[in-house]
């Protein structure tokens, strides 16, 4: 089982430092989820303003799984991966696609190109 921490767009990334830095190794989160939309409903527009949080996490924790959720699709996934995300959550981009399997393959290809296969 994995355990993670999520923060909303209106939460500073600074709240994570004490949790990740001072935790005992067994108590450290396996991943951090950066929401790139306000939680509540699908189909929202990706908030690129949240990518600096991803970049700060990646620079500080190179081995941490960093997940991004909200508004991700073909037009936004490269930016998320370039910022350091290596776990992508997509809802509308997959369920709204004519071929959901192809949509997932495109998302994976973009992340793999930036991060390598996990």
Image: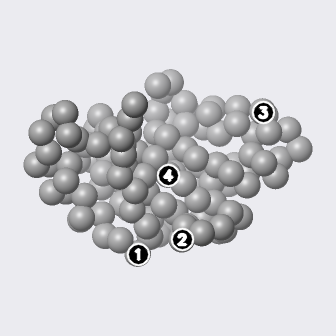
Local secondary structure at mark 3: helix
The quadrant in which residue 28 appears is top left
Task: Give the Cα separation between the discs numbered 3 and 4.
Answer: 20 Å
Residue 34 pos. (x, y %): 43, 57
Task: Give the Cα separation between the discs numbered 2 and 4.
Answer: 12 Å
Residue at left offset 36%, top offset 41%:
3
Residue at left offset 38%, top offset 35%:
2
Residue at left offset 49%, top offset 40%:
87
Local secondary structure at mark 1: loop
Identify the disc placed on residue 10: 1
Identify the disc placed on residue 68: 4
Q: Which residue is identified by label 3?
A: 101
Task: Mark 4: give few (<14), some (14-19) or many (20+) Cα within 10 Å.
Answer: many
Mark 2 and mark 1 lie on one chain; the one further toward the N terminus is: 1
Residue at left offset 30%, top offset 51%:
57
49 or 28, which is in the foreground? 28
Local secondary structure at mark 4: strand
């Amino acid at each position: 089982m994995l355990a993670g921490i999520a923060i909303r767009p209106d939460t500073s990334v600074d709240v994570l430092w004490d949790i990740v830095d001072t935790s005992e190794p067994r108590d450290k989160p396996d991943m951090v989820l950066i929401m790139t939309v306000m939680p509540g409903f699908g189909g929202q527009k990706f908030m690129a303003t949240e990518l600096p949080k991803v970049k700060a996490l990646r620079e500080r924790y190179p081995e941490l799984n960093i997940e991004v959720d909200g508004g991700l699709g073909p037009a936004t996934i490269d930016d998320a991966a370039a910022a350091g995300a290596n776990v992508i959550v997509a809802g509308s981009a997959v369920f709204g696609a004519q071929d959901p399997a192809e949509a997932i393959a495109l998302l994976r290809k973009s992340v793999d190109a930036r991060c390598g296969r996990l």
